[in-house]
Structures are given as C-alpha cells and as structure tokens.
Image (spheres, rainbow, N blue to C red):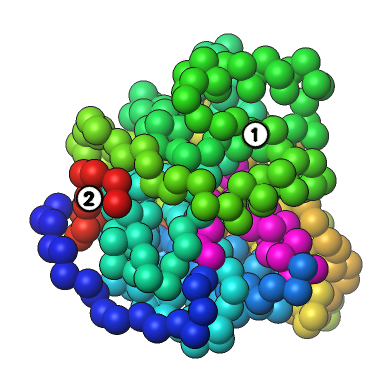
Amino acid sequence: MANQLQKPKELHSQKPVRVIFTGGFLGAGKTTALGSIARKLLQQGLTVGLVTNDQAANLVDTAIVGELGVPVAEVAGGCFCCRFTDLVDATEQILAKNPDVLLGEPVGSCTDLAATVVNPLKLFYGDIFRIAPFSVLVDPQRVQEFVLKEAPTRFPEEVSYIFRKQLEEADIIVLNKIDTLSPDEADRMFNALKELQPNKPVLKVSALRGDGVDEWLQMLMSDAPAGSHILRDIDYDTYAKGEAVLGWLNATVRLVGSPKFDADRFAKAMMSELQTAVNSRDAEVAHLKFLLTSGMQMLRGHLTKADAEPSFVGELGEVVEATLVLNARVALSPEALSSIATQAILNAAKTVNAEAEILSIQSFSPPYPRPPYRLSEPV
Ligand SMILES: Nc1nc2c(ncn2[C@@H]2O[C@H](COP(=O)(O)OP(=O)(O)O)[C@@H](O)[C@H]2O)c(=O)[nH]1
Ligand SMILES: [Mg+2]
C-alpha cells in the first residue's frame, strides 16, 4: 500500500464535472439508486456518464444501466480502490463524451474508499472534478443483522466488520428500501444508524419508489464535504478476510429450446435451485443476480438474502433461445459456488426442455486488497 503520489495521467474536461460515487454493501441498491439519480439528472437536461465496477467482467449491472442510454464504462477485474488507474482510464472515456455528471458504483464488498478513491481523485483532479459527498447505502435487513443484531447472521464477523467500516467512512448514510418498512420501523432503523454514527446525515430513501431521492440528490449536487471521514484504524487483514469469505461467480450461458422453451419458468427454477442449495449449506447470499435476454426482451432477478423471496423484473415467455448472465456473491468457497451454479443451471434447463451451453464460468474469492494510493488525511 505504498503512497505513490504521482498522478496516473492528465485528465481534461471542457467544464467542471460533478462526480457522484455511491457505495454500500452488496445488494443495498446502489445500481437502482444510480439509475434513479441518472434519470432525474437527465430530466433536468444534464448529461450523465456512468462507471460500473466489479471483480470480474460480464456484469449484470453494466447491462442494467445500459438501458439508460448514457455512456457507460466498466472497471472489471478488481475494485476502484485497487484499480485506481483503470478507474482514471474509464473516467477519461466518459469525459470524452463531455458529461455534466459522472456516476460511479464501487464494488459492494469494498471499504476504505474515502482514503483510496475519493481523496486521491480530489488531490489529482480537483481542478476538473466537483466530488459529491460519499454516500453509503444500507439495506434494512443488514441493519437488523449487523447493527441492531436482532436477526441471526450467517456471515462471519469479518463481513460485519466491512459493513461497519463502510458506515464509518460515509459522508452520508442512506437507509434504502424504506418502502419495505412501516414508518415506525424506518424510524427505529434511522435511530440505530444515528446512534452509531451521530455526526453525519442519515437519509431515508426508496431508490425503487423514489422517496427521498430529490433531497438526497440536492445534497449530492451541493459542495458539502466529500471524503471527510477517512478511516483511521482499518485492519486490512480483517477486511481481506471479510472479502475472501465471499465466493464470486460470473457465468454466461446460452440456452436453446427444442424448438422453444419457457424462459420465465427456467429463471424461477434456477433461482429456486440456487436458493435451496445455498440454504442447505447454511450459507448466506450477499447478492445473487441474473439477466436473461432474448432479442430485445429482458428478464432479471435478484436475491439479497438466502431465505428471502427473490424479485424478478420483466418477462420473456416462450423463446427459441436466450442468453443468461449470472453474477453470484455468496459466502461459499468458489468451488462450491461454481458446482452449485452449474447444477442449478443444468437442472433448470432440464425442467423446461432446453439445452444449456455454459460459455464462460469464473469463480474466485476477491484477492487481498492492495490499493496503490492511500491518503491518510482528507484533501
Ligand atoms: N423494495 C426495494 N427494493 C430495492 C430498492 N432499491 C433496490 N432494491 C432491490 O434490491 C436488489 C438489489 O439492488 P441493486 O441496485 O442491484 O443493488 P447493488 O448490489 O447495491 O447495486 C434489487 O432486487 C433491487 O430491485 C428499494 O428502494 N426498495
Ligand atoms: Mg450493483
């Protein structure tokens, strides 16, 4: 983690660019929130670009934000913090399109971003970037599990450590998914977060329904402090352990019917198979998501807790062929996750009489985080 304070490269922009990074644990709603923010900015007549990020390529998120019709660049093969130079390259691609606002979603298992991303960007590119306060989104289920400790957790302590560090480094904490809570429950969670982090704003938002997004966006477009809560005592060994317990799987599969197959039934069967396999091992899902496309039609599904109901968006019906992209982040070894996923895909294909050809499958644990730049004081 050497402090090489040399700027990776020069960046140019015809005008100052507002940069909005939204962090938060896997499944907290970052992609949904950035989509919602991007739509609002576009309605205001502003131009927008996006940078997505993952430990591997073939991202469901890149395809989802692709629907916005704005420039998107992907930093794959590592997080923004460990691939700072790639982040700068991706940013350069977007700057070529002359955006007013650049939105970025860091990997959900990452922390220490104030020190390794937000402040280095301010230091090197403060002349062209207006960096927004760093928001950290939280899912109420994880607040119950990691903050209130009312729900049992299947994650090891190191994962909870990452979650707490994410809150600690936030400029703004965003309690998301309040549409799933009664007003009293939302207040109770808000108070628990306030008690834990008394000196920072906590917002109640539903990225999906839009509640609270305008107020949040106003803060993001303001010149409020950004990256002002650099972590003082982050233990990289604990952080690395927390990341390493999460198996990461990305697969691309071609499905062909004889002559057609029910794509919706396939997707539900696959999710159900995956869920049963994870639960039978007493493991936990951080975020399991897929995208199934056939022609111009799309169906996607998400699961953010092993014993919760999966959610599906879209419908495909009977199709001749379809392409599946599966991204799973589950607290299981990469080998176990790969075997479960392969089995679930093949079994689900059998249920609907389709042929499944696995075009690519990658499964691994994130490597030890080694950010090339780390500032110990805010810029
Ligand atoms: N009920 C509800 N679900 C949400 C909200 N925001 C996101 N989600 C769902 O949470 C899941 C994960 O969302 P996503 O944006 O992909 O999370 P990310 O991993 O943080 O990028 C998806 O099923 C979303 O539809 C919200 O405000 N309310
Ligand atoms: Mg996402």
Identify residue type, mark 1. Leu
- Identify residue for label 1: 203
Residue linked to disc 2? 375
Magenta span contains residue 22: yes
In the picture shown, does residue 299 fall above or below 89?
A: above
* Total number of numbered discs in the rendering: 2
From the top left corner, tell me how far across and down residue 294 is, in percent: 76, 77
Q: Is residue 311 visible?
A: no
**Looking at the image, residue 87 lies above or below residue 186:** below
Spatial distance from mark 2 to mark 1, Cα to Cα? 27 Å
Judge left or right: residue 306 versus residue 37: left
Q: Nearer the viewer, residue 259 or 364?
A: 364
Q: Residue at x 29, y 51 (%)?
A: 379
Above or below, comparing residue 146 to residue 319 in the picture: above
Q: Residue at the location (59% across, 30% down)?
A: 202
Q: Is residue 54 or residue 1 the one in the foreground?
A: 1
Residue 224 percent coordinates (x, y): 51, 46
Residue 114 x %, y %: 35, 47
Residue 55 sits in quarter:
bottom left
Q: Residues within 10 Å of mark 2 (few under 14, many from 20)?
A: some
Q: Is residue 120 visible?
A: yes
Residue sitting at the far top: 150
User: Which residues lie in the magenta part?
Assistant: 18-43
Residue at horizontal 82 percent and vertical 46 percent from the top: 209
Dividing the picture into quarters, in which one does residue 102 lie? bottom right
SS class, disc 2? loop
Q: Is 62 or 192 nearer to us in this picture?
A: 192
Q: Position of residue 61 (x, y in %)?
A: 59, 63
